[in-house]
Amino acid sequence: MIGAGAAGLAAAAELGRRGVEAKVLERSDQIGVSWRRRYEGLRLNTVRWLSAPRGSRIPRSAGRWPSREAFVEHLQDYAEREEIEIEHGTTVRRIDRSERGYSLETSRGSCSARFVVVATGYDRSPAIPEWPGRDHFDGELIHAAHYRSPRDFWEQDVLVVGAGNTGTEIAVQLHQAGAARVRLAVRTPPNLVPLEPLGIPITLFARFGEVQPPGFVDLFGEVIQRLAWGDLTPFGLRSAPYGIGTELRVKGLGPVVDRGFVAALKEGGIELVSAVEGFDGVAAQ
């Protein structure tokens, strides 16, 4: 097992219940490190009682939408309770097939295993596009993975690139924390859903949608969005090219869960601009 995050820990525990010996190799000295390093104020977009590994529960004290701190604490308790074997400080550098399964080259030497589960996450390595002029830009350019607090951008002009869950949440944080100007670059308009439509956690609607045909989910999602906010075109946000159900199957992307983004957009606290094409070397003042 490679990676001591939620997926790696849960997979190791399930294998252990079935009598399969599993060891987790983790490059850092802590579990759930991806969560630990995310920005302040981050919360799960899945409701508490549907966010824990099987056989465990996140405490009610964590609230309906657990914070990153509460989720990390739960993962730590879960790993200890399930007695999961974790080898920290071990980076896997290469995996090759062998006669008995797989051979692994790690920072602590070589080892072998009959099966290998890679649970490092698809966004493990932050990447910034090679925009023309990027290397000569005289302002600050950081990836969202390295963003920590909106307080660092008080009274500054900030452009957030990407209208996914992370981008919209960061834009809202910056607006609320006193950034002088917040703009959001949008290449493809996202599908937006309320956190709790009709007072019901959006996670429950998502689970219901998993067993429905894409066309039905598309229509249902459109109705929910219209009832929640009406037409957002006057505020610069066009309709997404695919409905929620189709986009999930075509692109593997779920909708953006609104945490104040639409309200900030409507009141002018966040401005939408087109996709970034390049840099001219001069930061906005």
Image (cartoon, rainbow, N blue to C red):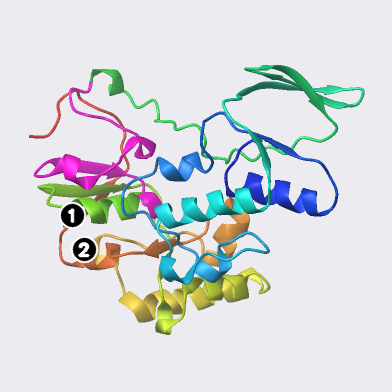
For label 2, the residue is 264
Answer whether residue 144 is magenta in the image.
yes
- Quarter of the figure with the N terminus: top right
Identify the residue at image location x=61%, y=37%: 3
What is the magenta range?
A: 137-166
Q: Position of residue 251 (x, y in %)?
A: 57, 51
For label 1, the residue is 175
Could you tell whether 103 is left or right of 205 in the image? right
Q: Quadrant of residue 112?
A: top right
Q: Secondary structure at mark 1?
A: helix
Seen as rendered, the residue at the extreme bottom is 198
The amino acid type of the residue labelled 1 equals His
Q: Where 2 sits versus 182, above or below?
A: above
Is residue 47 at least partly visible in the picture?
no
* Closer to us: 72 or 116: 72
Within-10-Å neighbours for mark 2: few <14, some 14–19, many 20+: some
Identify the residue at image location x=44%, y=31%: 127
Could you tell whether 279 is left or right of 242 in the image? left
Q: Secondary structure at mark 2?
A: helix
Which mark sits nearer the N-terminus, 1 or 2?
1
Asked if the residues shown at circle 1 and circle 2 are in contact, with their CB atoms under 8 angstroms apart, the answer is: yes
Q: Where 174 sits versus 198, above or below?
A: above
Q: Position of residue 113 (x, y in %)?
A: 82, 29
- Quarter of the figure with the C terminus: top left
Q: Position of residue 162 (x, y in %)?
A: 36, 46
Identify the residue at image location x=18%, y=49%: 182
Could you tell whether 266 is left or right of 112 in the image? left
Q: Where 202 sits versus 2, above or below?
A: below
The amino acid type of the residue labelled 2 equals Ala
How far apart are the alpha carbons under marks 1 and 2? 8 Å
Could you tell whether 124 is left or right of 135 in the image? right
Seen as rendered, the residue at the extreme right is 99
